[in-house]
Image (cartoon, rainbow, N blue to C red):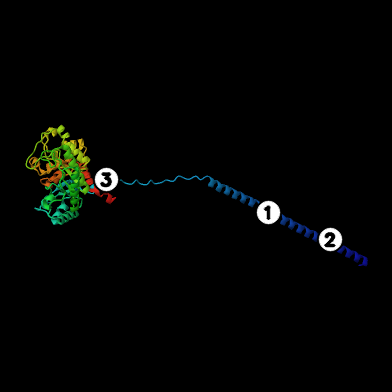
Amino acid sequence: MGRLEEQDFDEKRLARRQRRKKSQLMAFIILVTTLVLIIVAGAFGFYSIRKVVNAHKAEKEEAAAAAISSAQEVVIETPQETTPEPEEMTQGDVLEEIVNSCISELTLEEKVAGLFMVTPEQLTGVETVVKAGSSTQDALSKYAIGGLFYSAKNLKSKDQIMEMLRNTSDMSKYPLFMAVKEDGSGNGAIEASLGSLEAGEINNSDTAYNAGNVIGTAMFGYGFNFDIAPDLDITENGKYGQEMESVADITVSLASGLHDGGVTTCVYQFPVAADTKSEMVTNEISKEELTTSSYVVYQRAIGDGGAKAVMMSNVSLPNITGDNTPASLSSVMISDELRGMLGFDGVVVTGPLNEAAVTEYYTSGEAAVKAISAGADVVFLPENFEEGIQGVLEAVGNGIITEDRINESLRRIYRLKYAGKVTEIK
């Protein structure tokens, strides 16, 4: 090859090399430019996205803040259901609950026996009871009687009385009326056996109240809770004279004093007194005469005096009842007159049903059934209490007396027995 050709070849090769470098440079520039564009675009995109995110986040925060502000400004409370607090029970409510609970636990036999008040001798068969031993325990286990009536022969000393009554009460499954007749006149069971209670002379309302309080306090201390006193007799044989207003003042005050001393008072004999131990006694008094005499005294005794129990007389009052039925067994005298006319809703006790005015005309069962049918609550001293209980049970079985009628009397009795204990229980 000539020199010129060789030179020309070299120039061409150099030119190609320069073109290649130029192409490479252009490619590199394009690549770099592309990368820069990509980076710039990415940065811009990231910034845009971040801006959008931040804006959205800010929007959410503003919305949340607004919601909180709104919630703070307006608070709507959802009403909540509240359980009303039970009203506090009154003493009367508590008493009724106790009474109903006691009665619901009794068998029919126990209910009927609970209407009877007998002597400790009748209950046990012992000639004279001065303590509560196995005979008392056995008898009370068999008959859930409502009460026991003690007389002077049962009372020997304070300690003896307290022990006898306490043990008797402990032996009984149900509360008992521990009854006695005492009015401070010197003829009552306690004074007749233990001597004076230092009640003092009773000649006006003040001395009567003081005497009643002394007697009631002493009785309560012995363990008695039921006193058959005072006697509301306004005849010439009455303890406090014949002047109606004076008798009313004295007996009402005496009853109040006994009650405040701690015992239940059972005024007697409604409507008029009579000696019916040996025979029937008929009194021809009219209703109009009773309304202006005896009824006035009884109305005050069960009102102002707070007497919670009334004992009936066994006298016959044909001008009022239309026959010779003893007042203790008469629905006219108990339901119509005492409960209806005088408004008495306490415990009605029969007169002693072992008196001739009753026993000569009725068996023990008949007398008990007739008394309860008439409206009496407590069958007092029947001639034979076992026959009396059986007679009432048979009357319930035959539909002559309903169990509701038995429950009615038991409610009155148990209200009286538990009335002073409600505050302790409550």
Q: CA distance from mark 3 to mark 2?
A: 125 Å
Q: Callout 1 environment at 10 Å: few (<14), some (14 to 19), or many (20+)? A: few
Circle 2 residue: 19
Q: Quadrant of residue 232?
A: top left
Q: Quadrant of residue 268?
A: top left
Residue drawn at x 55%, y 48% as measured from the top left? 68
From the viewer's perspective, is the residue at label 2 or at label 1 nearer? 1
Q: Nearer the viewer, residue 85 or 250?
A: 250
* Kind of residue indicated by mark 1: Tyr
Q: Is residue 4 left or right of residue 310?
A: right
Mark with earlier residue (3, 2)? 2
Tell me residue 195's x, y (percent): 12, 52
In this picture, is 234 found above or below 211? above
Circle 3 residue: 96
Q: CA distance from mark 1 to mark 3?
A: 86 Å
Q: Quadrant of residue 379?
A: top left
Q: Quadrant of the N terminus?
A: bottom right
Mark with earlier residue (1, 3)? 1
Label 3: which secondary element = helix
Label 2: which secondary element = helix
Q: Callout 2 environment at 10 Å: few (<14), some (14 to 19), or many (20+)? A: few
Tell me residue 408's x, y (percent): 22, 42
Circle 1 residue: 47
Residue 297 visible? The answer is yes
Residue 186, which numbered label? none
